[in-house]
Amino acid sequence: METIAIVGGGIAGLALAACLDPERFEVTVYEKRPELPAVGSALGMWPNAQRALARVGVLDEARSVSPVIGSGSVRSPDGEPWVTVDAGEMFGVSRIDLLRLLHAAVPATVRRTTSHLREVPADGGLVVGADGVHSVVRRQVWGARTDARLTPYLALRGTLPSPVSRDEVGEYWGRGDLFGMTAARGGSFWYASYRSGLGPYGIEVATTLEQARQRYATHAPAIRRALAAATPESCLVQRLWTVPHLRSYVRGRNVLIGDAAHAMMPTLGRGACESLVDAVTLAGLLNTLPESQALREYDRQRRLRTRALSLASSALGRIALAEGGQPLRDRLLNLARRRQARAAVVSGSGG
Ligand SMILES: Cc1cc2nc3c(=O)[nH]c(=O)nc-3n(C[C@H](O)[C@H](O)[C@H](O)COP(=O)(O)OP(=O)(O)OC[C@H]3O[C@@H](n4cnc5c(N)ncnc54)[C@H](O)[C@@H]3O)c2cc1C
């Protein structure tokens, strides 16, 4: 049996552990959290992530506990829809449900160790860094110059037991801030992001919630209602970090997957999706090819694609969170709104 140490039992690490061939590999997952998190957020599952979930064997169950996203609008801060996008079959799964399903999909042969690793395991086998944006594997093997970069933005998110109405769903782009609302299992999910000097570590939720209520005090009533109803216990807050682009996701017998390889701005909602795709891609290759060939092929299939998504997420983040360029952005979005309205009239009269 070949040994594989997976550092990090989050979305990427668990999906990988679930898909590796138990006849061929002796797998250990090292996870610092003793239990699943109590507060979660909703993660939009794009089609490629849905295919990955199908490979793990949990797609039907994930779909059954997650509302379909349907359509959503990019809106002005006071709630006027600028552009409406049809999200097709995308659904929003709660992070807690996703982790629970992935957990259950990991075979009993996989050894689980609750431990906060400070160093890469040195048993001579393959090491997979699935330990997120502040990866110890990346730091130790790729070096401190690949440490995560702090962005000026903060993300505050929470769930509410009340549903969000169709004409309020979407993302509201203001001057240097955004606010999103979507349906979630048993209610709704909201998130806010803006430039903030709080942190970077140990940010107090109650303080941030108060700051957000002031910041969004003149925004749409739906935003104010959501923030007024939010409690610190139902919210998460963090500064946003990204990982610099790496020349390779593989070094010797070490390989990075998920946020450890490519943590990106959350604006496109792709991080968890790409983490799942990394995991099933790597597992499929390791199950069928000699290790060195599998690792080369994994790097070839995944690095440029995730790099492109990371660049696109940053670019969209600059537009959504625009400050100086906000008036121009809003004029362009108003134009897009008029075009979309004209197209709807033409297709209505033609049909
Ligand atoms: C505000 C925000 C919104 C987002 N929205 C979306 C979205 O809508 N859709 C989407 O697809 N993505 C979204 N993402 C991105 C998504 O959350 C991440 O891409 C995803 O969680 C990455 O999964 P991962 O398993 O690679 O890393 P993580 O989820 O960070 O998991 C890493 C795991 O490793 C463990 N760990 C870390 N260090 C160690 C150690 N030294 N020893 C042992 N264990 C360790 C951690 O406890 C954790 O369980 C969002 C991110 C943010 C910040």
Image (spheres, rainbow, N blue to C red):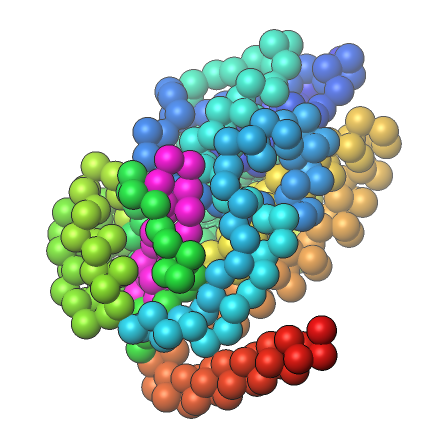
Direction top: furthest residue: 108
In this view, 87 is above or below 279:
below
Image quadrant for the N terminus?
top right
Residue 283 falls in image quadrant: top right
Estimate the x, y position of residue 153 in percent, counting from the top left.
Answer: 33, 63
The answer, for residue 252, to whether it is visible in the render is no
* Identity of the residue drawn at 77% across and 13% down: 23
- Where does residue 247 sit, x and y in percent of width and height? 66, 57
The reply, left or right, for residue 122 in relation to residue 158 is right
Dominant secondary structure of the residues highlighted in magenta in the image: strand
Number of marks: 0
- Vertical side of 82 occupied by 63: above or below: above
Residue nearest the viewer, comparing 98 with 351: 351
Residue found 21% across the figure and 37% down from its top: 233
Residue 167, image quadrant? bottom left
Which of the 4 image quarters holds residue 348?
Answer: bottom right
Residue 5 is at least partly visible in this image:
yes
Image-based side of 255 in relation to 320, left or right? right
Q: Nearer the viewer, residue 243 or 208?
A: 208
Q: Which residue is pictured at 31% across the width and 77% down the height?
A: 175
For the point 60% across and 81% down, the residue is 345
The percent position of residue 134, horizontal first and vertical second, equals 44, 45
Stretch in magenta = 178-194
